[in-house]
Amino acid sequence: MLTQTLHKELSGYQLGEKVHQLRAGRGLTLAELGSHTGMSAAMLSKIERGRLIPTLPTLMRIALVFSVGLEHFFTDIHKRHAFGVMRKKDRIRLPAGDSKNAPYLYESLDYEVRDPKLNAWLAHFQDFDGKAHHHDHVGIEFLYLVSGQLELTWGGQSHTLEAGDSIYFDGTVPHSYRRLGKQACTGVVVTRRD
């Protein structure tokens, strides 16, 4: 029998709710989960409603059905899933490359996210008279032009983008950006490593 203190501490992990989320996500009934785990639907119902704290072996039997580890049940949801709110007032504008000849200034749109699966920036393309600097990187890139007019060169071919246009391309191919005209030119750039 668990003491009140232990019960309170274990209840904080919301084990029953996590079991329910896994089961509902797969569309299984309590009876179906019971047939996979060898437990009764009544016992699983008590676990899901928080009336019964499962033992580690019981929890492991449930975890195996859903191909998750025990850490799934004991890790804070905020540490297990990527999440972050980035406030406009907190963003810092930095030059891309050499600060004197940077083709654009950027603001990170995902700096609060731990281990992001993609990266996003707000790019402010500069009035740039010099030779466009080509660069490449692992993965793909997506650019949505919010305002202005932009020339994007990719693989030796130039493409003119207007506000509202977007482009998706392989980042391993050398590419460059050049603002066209004097109007402010901004875009949202998203990259993802393969």
Image: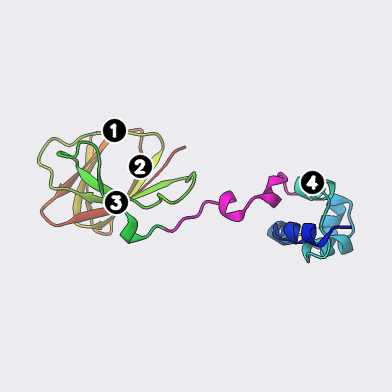
Q: Quadrant of the N terminus?
A: bottom right
Instruction: Please count the marks in the image.
Output: 4
- The amino acid pointed to by label 3 is Ile
Q: Earlier in the sequence, mark 2 or mark 1?
A: 2
The alpha-carbon separation of the residues under discs 1 and 3 comes to 27 Å
Any magenta on residue 87? no
Dot in front, 2 or 3 = 3
- Kindly check if marks 4 and 3 are in contact, taking CB atoms under 8 A apart as contact: no
- Kindly check if marks 2 and 3 are in contact, taking CB atoms under 8 A apart as contact: no
- The amino acid pointed to by label 1 is Pro
Residue that appears at 50% across and 55% down: 83
Q: Earlier in the sequence, mark 1 or mark 3?
A: 3
The alpha-carbon separation of the residues under discs 4 and 1 comes to 49 Å
Find the magenta span and give its range.
65-85
The image shows residue 67 at horizontal and vertical percentages of 72, 45
Q: Name the residue that disc number 1 marks.
A: 174
The image shows residue 36 at horizontal and vertical percentages of 84, 51
Q: Name the residue that disc number 2 marks.
A: 169
Residue that appears at 46% across and 55% down: 84
The alpha-carbon separation of the residues under discs 4 and 3 comes to 45 Å
Q: Name the residue that disc number 3 marks.
A: 92
The image shows residue 129 at horizontal and vertical percentages of 9, 41
**Residue closest to the eye, 167 or 35:** 35
Q: Name the residue that disc number 4 marks.
A: 60
